[in-house]
Image: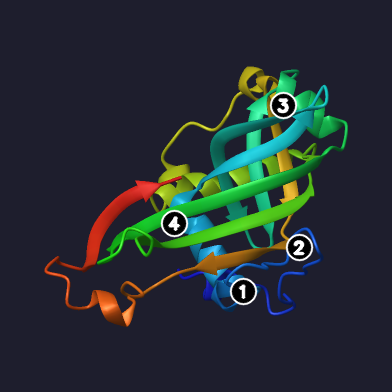
Amino acid sequence: MTAMETIPKTSSPLSCCPRSRVKRAAKRASYEREPAYALIDRLKTGHVAFVEDGEPRIIPMTVWRRDDTLYLHTLNGGRLSQRLDAGDQLCISFAVTEEWVMSKSAFHHSANYQSLVLFGQAARVVDNGEFDEAFKAIINQLEPGRWDQVREPNTKERKATALYRIPIEEGAFKSRTGGPNEEPEDMALPVWHGTRPAALEI
């Protein structure tokens, strides 16, 4: 199932404001949901940033999507659950480097990548039905039909797990493709240029 097939018909483009609007290389940005959802569904790992005691914090963790909603889970009563329950603003990022861009000049070396930054607030999931559907979604994304084969969470496991939903509303997708941008005077330099595969997911 593609990201486009799982975008509700009522979905509008991602909203943006000064904090989420791409300013540098803005032509590489997109506010459409299809590329954003495809990246989330591919990686299922994001970096969740928040502020605690006046200082920035960021935690890499499993983050997945069901329709227009992100889900993440953490230890019930732990540090992160306390911040989420307090309604703190979150910034969640996803990124993958596809290729290294090798230039004839040091300055023009670059990377071909896909990235997504989202903003929002989390709400705790308290409904058992939504709890099961959210975890069913991630388990079946890892392997179709697997939820029906494994044991469902028991009472103890449910109590230990804090599950949160974040509406996918504000943010921006950004990507780069193609070869190096070269200066005309550098083209005669006897050094190879082009792209090399990378396998770096952040």
How is colour applied across the structure in the image? rainbow
Residue beneath label 4, please? 42
10 Å neighbourhood of mark 1: few (<14), some, or many (≥20)?
A: few
Q: Position of residue 108 (x, y in %)?
A: 37, 65
- Residue kind at label 2, given as amino acid type: Glu
Question: Label 1 to label 2, Cα distance in Å?
Answer: 19 Å
- Residue kind at label 3, given as amino acid type: Leu
Q: Secondary structure at mark 4?
A: helix
- Residue kind at label 4, given as amino acid type: Arg
The answer to whether residue 136 is above or below residue 154 is below
Residue beneath label 2, please? 169
- Outermost residue, front side: 185
* Picture quadrant where residue 51 is located: top right
Q: Which sits earlier in the primary sequence, circle 1 or circle 2?
A: 1
Is 99 left, or right, of 51 in this rendering? Answer: left
Residue beneath label 1, please? 26
Question: Label 2 to label 3, Cα distance in Å?
Answer: 21 Å
10 Å neighbourhood of mark 4: few (<14), some, or many (≥20)?
A: few
